[in-house]
Amino acid sequence: MGIEEIERYINKELKQFKIKQYSKGYKYLAAAIYICILNEDAIENMSQNVYPIVAQKFKVKNIKRVKWTLENAINIIYRDTEINTLCKYFDIEIDQKLTVKFFVYTIVSKFINSKQQHTTF
């Protein structure tokens, strides 16, 4: 699967949630998801495997700033997106909060599952 196809998939998935496409949070989320699609093991330790790469890509000096921006983006999505949309997409209860890791993991898992469905007969 090519870079453009992965990017289209990520954008299609993120469009289901209320977050501005031009925001740093959206861009960082898309980058984090992309990194984890390329390397599924990266999600196990996002502080070591994902945040530094996102920071480097966007020329952010402090990795904690990347983490904060991602957490803020998830909070915005949780606040602004219809709760039923979130519950259905992430298979969560109404009062269950989302974490960056769970958000990224779910989208990466859906990507992997869709890729596997296309390769099986």
Image (cartoon, rainbow, N blue to C red):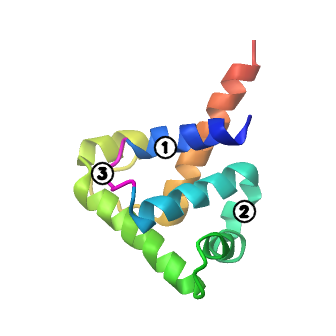
Q: Which numbered marker is on residue 11? A: 1
Left or right: 27, with 86 as reference point: right
Picture residue at 59% right of the left edge, 61% below the top: 32
> According to the image, label 3 marks what residue?
18
| Circle 2 crowding by C-alpha within 10 Å: few under 14, some 14–19, many from 20 | some
Left or right: 12, with 4 as reference point: left
The first of marks 1 and 2 along the sequence is 1
> According to the image, label 2 marks what residue?
42
Amino acid type shown at disc 2: Ala
How many numbered marks appear?
3
- Residue 22 rendering spot, x and y as whole percentages: 39, 58
- Residue 51 rendering spot, x and y as whole percentages: 62, 73
Q: Which residues are magenta?
A: 16-21
Left or right: 43, with 105 as reference point: right
Contact, mark 2 vs mark 3 (Cβ under 8 Å)? no
Picture residue at 33% right of the left edge, 55% below the top: 19
- The nearer-to-camera label among 2 and 3 is 3
The first of marks 2 and 3 along the sequence is 3
From the viewer's side, name the closer residue of 121 and 17. 17
Q: Is residue 69 magenta?
A: no
Amino acid type shown at disc 1: Asn
Q: CA distance from mark 1 to mark 2?
A: 20 Å
Indicate the quadrant containing the N terminus: top left, top right, bottom left or bottom right.
top right
Amino acid type shown at disc 3: Lys
Q: CA distance from mark 3 to mark 1?
A: 12 Å
**Residue 60 against residue 23 in the figure, above or below:** below
The first of marks 3 and 1 along the sequence is 1
